[in-house]
Image (cartoon, grey):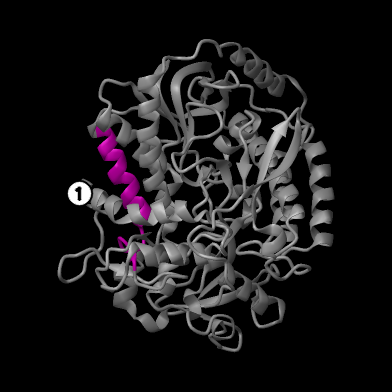
Amino acid sequence: MKFDVLIVGAGGAGLYAALEAAKNAKDLKVGVLTKVYPTRSHTGAAQGGINAALANIDPLDTPEAHAFDTIKGSDYLADQQASKFLCEKAPEVIRELEHMGTPFSRLNNGKIAQRPFGGASHDRTCFSADKMGHVMLHTLFEQCLRYNVEFINEWFMLNLVHNGERVQGVTAYDIKTGKTEFIQAKSVILATGGHARIYWGYTSNALGCTGDGTAAALRAGIPLKDMEFLQFHPTGLRRSGVLVTEGARGEGGHLLNNKGERFMSKYAPSKMELGPRDLVSRSIITEIREGRGWKDAEGRGYVHLDLTHLGEEKIKQKLPQIRELAIDFEGIDPIKEPIPIKPTAHYAMGGIDTNVKCETVIKGIYAAGESQCVNVHGANRLGGNSLLDIVVFGRVAGEEAIKFARENDFAAGGEEKLKDDNAFLQSLFDKENTESLADIRDELGHIMYNHFGVFKDEKGMQEGKEKFLKLKERAKNLAVQDKSKIFNTDLISLLEFQNIMELAEVLIETSLARKESRGSFSRDDYPTRDDENYLYHSMVTLENGELKLGKSEVDISLYEPAERKY
């Protein structure tokens, strides 16, 4: 196979990139390689909405206000010109999505409805009930089919291939047949999503969110940025971690402790339940720690998200999916009872280092979406900015990849990498398996949640690192037990696990190096933000099998860092 533009990943970023390329470069061959059928991508799990300063509710809202809210929400670690670019492009991409046929919820005057979201100074979150990501994903997939994008479904990318300067292509495994192939490409866009599955049983992420592109970029020598910043969403269902959208609080839901108090009045008196996600998550954990939460039979601490006062009609109209999830996973009907919730590992602010053009240090390799760190979210992402991020930078990546493909021919070589990857895969089949993948994977989740969760400290993280290194040694004894070639999910699960292990180690090392609290990153032993020593992006590269930590400057050209109050 040979493509002018090859996109890896078929979520919102990958599909928008493919659509942009296919519409504007009909003479180029555009392909999308994806390990799941496109409409199963994790973008479909996004619920609450997408931000844009349309001023349909509040005529005073502007892209400038949106940018400031984003930068403030980031705890001043966002690159400010990048955040400004994101917010200025927001109304434009919303209009594009609207003209494609995305079924937004509407006001009585026909304009796109907007709801309040955490950390926002205006009501700017456009929505489609509580399934915004789902309708966006299907709309974009339909448009890609319209423009004849070629989909390579159910293939797993193994590695990026380059000559040190230029991309040559990727190696990939056909899940359906078990064959491997070197796919030559003039340009490659990584849109492979986040990696919160390193927290395994404590995450809102789908099973496939294992950071495959991010790990491949690390192995290829491309720097990763700000990997210690992984956001916990305040409201995951108590047992499963499945997401309960911020839109539930945007529509008026209350967080209650075991005394029946709306406890956010202590932590964010002006914003209450609509404080930024990091603040609300810490507040919930504090309530549980100090005995004002509940504990279930398994010892899980939780608080309540109460929607009962919203009434049956509003819940069925605005939050139908949340009601369904609460009934299916908790046996709770939110029309009648509060929903038991706790923070859940949700979103990676860190990822593959790129500039605003989505370019990496290797020419012809781009990244977009949650796998990318441009850095528009800094230390904490605002709700509604993730769907915006994937479409804005998905479009940019598509534009830039077209330009590169037009100006450059295929880089010679790269086929030899396939021999190395085939030998590695064969080794997984040949060696004896003496460990349980399920057990080790669960143990990784416990280590990460207990030692690198909402709150951290030096002693706990060092203990967690020691446990991780022992687990890493045990993981060397994992092998493929299913020896078949067709749809070998045992092999795919092992490859995914190896990716999250690599990324978990990066998160551990960067967490230990940052001795402050900022945004989603909170340390009990260093409870304050330290701009003098830690106002920097952490950078990580893999050199000769060893992780190398570095730093890069934060762009603060628009707003001076200030204390963050809500």
Q: Name the residue rendered at 68%, 36% in the picture.
A: 541
Location of residue 163 (image quadrant): top right
Q: Position of residue 472 (x, y in %)?
A: 78, 39
Magenta region's main secondary structure?
A: helix
Per the image, is 473 magenta?
no
The residue stretch that appears in magenta: 124-145
User: For this view, does 341 lie left or right of residue 137?
Assistant: right
Percent x, y for residue 17? 37, 37
Q: Residue at x 70, y 24 (%)?
A: 428
Magenta includes 142?
A: yes
Q: Look at 55% across and 61% down and name the residue there.
A: 380
> x and y percent of residue 360 in the render?
53, 34
Quadrant of the snapshot with the N terminus: top left
- Residue at which label 1 appears: 99
Residue 143 located left or right of residue 339: left
Find residue 159 and report its image quarter.
top right
Q: Is residue 355 above or below residue 300?
A: above
Of residues 332 and 563, the one nearer the viewer is 563
Q: Is residue 394 visible?
A: yes
Q: 564 or 371, which lies in front?
A: 564
Q: Secondary structure at mark 1?
A: helix
Q: How many marks?
A: 1
Can residue 238 be seen in the rendering of this structure?
A: no
67 in relation to 390, above or below? below
Looking at the picture, which amino acid does disc 1 mark? His
